[in-house]
Amino acid sequence: MINYKNYIGWFIGSFVLFPVMLHFYSTFSINRNEGKKYYQSYINNSVEIKIKISEYEEKGKIYGITFKSGSYLASYSRSGSNNGAMDKLICYSQENKKYFAVTVFDFLFQYGQSKFEIIRRILDNKEIFITVNKDDLANPKYGTKENPIPVFNYKGIEKTIMVNVGNDGYIILEPTQKEYEHNVITYLTYIMPKEEFKERFEKRKINIRFKKKAEKQIL
């Protein structure tokens, strides 16, 4: 005889309780900010500067280029954690006296290989334009080897950064506007520490709102 109580208990545990627990675990264990709400503000407050991707020596100290390939945790599911691809190229700018990290998320070819595997070879000893947030650029906490200034968009100076494929084809290796926005949204949502996010976006928005309200009252 079928034990319906056990079947119902299994059904509720598998399809009701487990998904709910998974949702709450993902919500409170994964760093998640409202990146989509403020990404445009981050982009609008950015500036384009020129840097050279190269190794060099100064006063006996060698400044090299570091490539880091990793992942970020986006969510949990029944099959496990859902990770996205994160690649960084970290270098020191002699002109700006700061470290920068060209960072891309999920920057993959259709067959899954990271485009950055090719990009890091192409950019070696090249000058490029990078887009950086003004607050990051002015913040003394950013620009060190341990905490380089994040860069989510770049392009060639004299010509577009691309690689030839076959006899007549080519692949552009610069981020599109959509990929640039994805980089910023992903960084703000999953990478930027919650406290920093609150200070830079949420609390600043509240302060601006109160300031405008006070100005109206004065007028």
Image: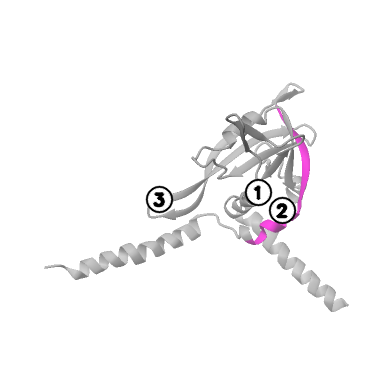
Measuring from the top left, give residue 202's x and y in whole percent.
Answer: 67, 63
Vertical placement of residue 114 versus 1, above or below: above
99 vs 88, nearest the viewer: 88
Q: Amino acid at mark 1?
A: Tyr
Q: Which residue is mark 2?
A: 43
Mark 1–mark 2 Cα distance, whole angstroms, equals 9 Å
Which image quadrant for residue 148?
A: top right
For marks 3 and 2 on the same chain, the one whose residue lies earlier in the sequence? 2
The crowd level at tag 2 (other Cα within 10 Å; few <14, some 14-19, many 20+) is some
For marks 1 and 2 on the same chain, the one whose residue lies earlier in the sequence? 2
Vertical placement of residue 79 versus 62, above or below: below
Colour scheme used in the picture? one colour
Measuring from the top left, give residue 155's x and y in whole percent.
Answer: 71, 40
Provide the residue span drawn in magenta: 37-54
Q: Amino acid at mark 3?
A: Gly
Q: Nearer the viewer, mark 3 or mark 1?
A: 1
Q: Which residue is mark 1?
A: 180
Q: Are marks 3 and 1 in contact (CB under 8 Å)?
A: no
Residue at the top extreme of this rendering = 60
Q: Nearer the viewer, mark 1 or mark 2?
A: 1
The crowd level at tag 1 (other Cα within 10 Å; few <14, some 14-19, many 20+) is some
Measuring from the top left, give residue 212's x and y in whole percent.
Answer: 80, 71
The N terminus lies in quadrant: bottom left
